[in-house]
Amino acid sequence: MTLKFTIHYGMHLLFPALIAFMFFKKQWLFVWFIFISTMLVDLDHLLATPIFEANRCSINFHPLHSYIAIGIYFMASFFSKTRLIAVGLLLHMLADLIDCYLK
């Protein structure tokens, strides 16, 4: 297992669990489930050719990882009904952004 792999999936799985536990102690498992559910945003990888490329940066390559989409996720974080999903998506984008700089 490489350091890049460990950091990438740690950011996708463990970091959201930590955030959920720190800020939503009574409902952390439910919040973590919502955060993990936002990984469905990676379905946009199916539109790429090839579908997976180890060294490709997802940010601004895939439609749901674009700067416009990230702006929408940021705006959605200001509304209570969409906040948890938006924060989960932003955490996902942060994990993918960090992955862009790891070789």
Image (spheres, rainbow, N blue to C red):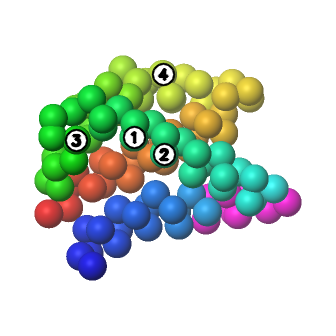
The majority secondary structure of the magenta stretch comes to: helix
The amino acid type of the residue labelled 1 equals: Asp
Q: Residue at x 35, y 68 (%)?
A: 7
Disc 2 residue type?
A: Met
**Label 4's element?**
helix
User: Marks 4/1: CA distance?
Assistant: 16 Å
Between the residue at mark 3 and the residue at mark 1, the CA separation in whole angstroms equals 11 Å
Q: CA distance from mark 1 to mark 2?
A: 6 Å
> What element does badge 2 sit on?
helix
Instruction: Read off the residue under disc 2.
Output: 39
SS label for mark 3: loop
The CA span between labels 2 and 3 is: 16 Å
* Residue 44 counted in the magenta span: no
Question: Which residue is at 58% across, 45% downward?
Answer: 37
Tell me the quadrant of the picture where the N terminus can be found.
bottom left
Residue 85 falls in image quadrant: top right
Q: Which residues are magenta?
A: 18-26
CB within 8 Å, label 1 to label 2: yes
